[in-house]
Image: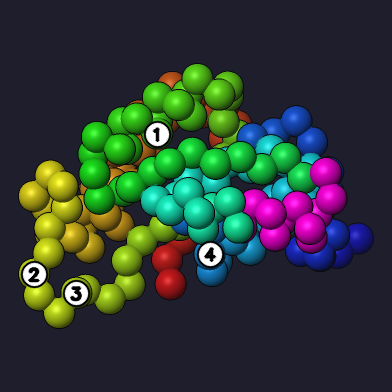
Amino acid sequence: MSWDPRHLPSAAGRTFVVTGGNAGIGYFTAEQLASAGERVIVASRSAEKARRAIASIGEQVPGASVEFVPLDLGSLSSVADAAAQLRASGPIDGLINNAGLVSPPSRRATTDDGHELIVGTNFFGHFALTAQLWPALTATARVIGLGS
């Protein structure tokens, strides 16, 4: 039996959080997890982009269980709010830390908390999210970091 990402084994009853699950690698990760029957929570800055992604996943995977939680990794206050909402939603079987910035802006920019934008968003934001979700992770949970 070989593994095929187009035909994943059932993972019904499990919950995965995908940061940046509204576009790119994060979107396709969310779609694949949903196709395996997992409950997927898309954590994203843009509610509009997340809703479009969720609708698209629903078209590709009829009956998919996909939800949205607002998350701006460049704001530790937003990270705390998202973590509280995610902890309240039940145990988490997997956290896919995917969201991030690829190219720096042409002028120096900082996060809401005064950190350099890319470091604050790509690293501090995900570190804070993971730390605050730790109590909600199941004993067999996986935390996966992606980057492109």
Q: Is residue 123 left or right of residue 143?
A: left
Q: Nearer the viewer, residue 70 or 10?
A: 70
Tell me whether the residue at label 3 lies in contact with that at label 2, contact meaning CB atoms closer than 8 angstroms.
yes
Q: Earlier in the sequence, mark 3 or mark 1?
A: 1
Residue pictured at 40% horizontal, 30% vertical: 83
Up/down of 122 relative to 131, above or below = below
Queried whether the magenta region covers residue 59, the answer comes back as yes
What's the CA distance linking mark 3 and mark 2?
7 Å
Describe the element under mark 4 as helix, strand or loop.
loop
Residue pictured at 85% horizontal, 59% vertical: 7
Q: Local crowd at mark 2 within 10 Å, few (<14), some, or many (≥20)?
A: few
Q: Main secondary structure of the magenta part?
A: helix
Q: What residue range appears in magenta?
A: 53-63
Up/down of 131 relative to 125, above or below = above
The label shown at residue 23 is: 4
Residue 51 pos. (x, y %) = 58, 51
Q: Local crowd at mark 4 within 10 Å, few (<14), some, or many (≥20)?
A: some
Residue 76 pos. (x, y %) = 23, 39
Can see residue 139? Answer: no
Q: Nearer the viewer, residue 137 or 53?
A: 53
Q: Which residue is denoted by mark 2 in the rendering?
A: 108
* Quadrant location, the N terminus: bottom right
What's the CA distance linking mark 4 and mark 3?
20 Å
Q: Which residue is denoted by mark 3 in the rendering?
A: 105
Describe the element under mark 3 as helix, strand or loop.
loop
Name the residue type under label 4: Ala
